[in-house]
Amino acid sequence: MFFKSKRFLAAGMLLSMMAFAAAGCGGGDKKADAPKKDAAKVYNVGIVQLVEHQALDDSRKGFIEGMKKKGFEEGKNVKYDVQNAQADQSNLQTIAQRFVNNNVDLICAIATPSAQTMANATKTIPIVGSAITSYESAKLVKSDKKPETNVTGTSDMAPVAAQLDLGLKLKPGAKKVGLMFTSSEMNSLIQIKMAEEHLKKAGVAYEEGSVNTVNDIQEIARSLVSKGVEFIYVPTDNVIASATPALVAITNEAKVPVIAADAILLKSGATASVNIEFFQLGVISGEMAGDILSGKAKPQDMPISFQKEFTPSINKAQAEKLGLKVPEELAKFAK
């Protein structure tokens, strides 16, 4: 289910339409369907978000919109218990116990640690994930095609090769790339492994810098810059995403671009990305949840849904600030 670089690169790399694919069924109909399982019931849905940053916020908002499309609307037939763990594992465990004790009808788990904690707490309450990179690697499902557990949802697997190649187009001839990630985030480790493999094939050296908390970001950034990296790649990483300005403060001074897996980070000073659409992935998760609550589907039979096509984004002002020349083939994506 991982993306291959040849689908995203070449001169035309860069796809302008966005679609999502499941390994079978998944998101469901576009228009709202009236819930049929119990028309009189008000469903209790717990939403747990690992930490506050825009990608995860968009996933949550998309989930609620997707539920609405399926006929589940807050104040009418669904009540949300929205919890933010503030990146604290003990908070996640407390939230999981809260949801179990309250016997919620469904849990929306946003980010891999959230889903893992919820799945450890209950094997019966349906869990629909969003902003999760690899359900299989996180041991949330037996397979993406058929989970066979109480967990399903959407994946934010990034087109890592395409993102790195975008960085190499903006820094032609680059000989060394920095890879920056949080060592405790499985989603980041998966993407960094993919980045290593792609850079090895491309004959480009790399330096790694791992952080534990936001307090490490500037120190690690300085270390990577001192080692001569020509741009820094950041995967979909919750810790770094929550404190991107701290990273950019160092890289801007050194004229080193940041290529982010999450295009939302461009608003905080990252230079370029190949987009992941967190809101739309959240919508699909919400539609999947709606089908579960309506009795139309069970999580164990619902394939994980993946984003299929991507578009690049370039922060034009940031590129100019760093003295980058945007290739003509990418100029239309510089905004």
Image (tube, rainbow, N blue to C red):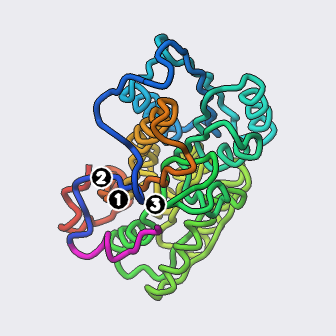
The answer to which of 298 and 69 lies nearer the viewer is 298
Whether label 2 touches label 1, CB < 8 Å = yes
User: Residue at the location (26% across, 69% down)?
Assistant: 13
Q: Is residue 268 above or below residue 30?
A: below
Q: Quick one: SS at disc 3?
A: loop
Mark toward the start of the polypeptide (2 vs 3): 2
Res. 228 image quadrant = bottom right
What residue does disc 3 label?
Answer: 158
As drawn, 38 above or below 279? above
Q: Position of residue 271 (x, y in %)?
A: 40, 56
Instruction: Evaluate whether residue 135 shows in this view.
Output: yes
Report the magenta residues as a range.
1-11
Amino acid bearing label 3: Ala
Q: Residues within 10 Å of mark 1 (few under 14, many from 20)?
A: some
Separation of residues labelled 2 and 3 (CA atoms): 14 Å
Q: Say which label, 1 or 3, has the lower sequence index.
A: 3
Residue that appears at 42% across and 45% down = 281
* Residue 58 visible at all: no
Q: Nearer the viewer, mark 1 or mark 3?
A: 1
Q: Residue at x 48, y 84 (%)?
A: 204
| Mark 2 or mark 3, whichever is nearer to me | 2
Q: Amino acid at mark 1?
A: Lys
Residue receiving disc 1: 308
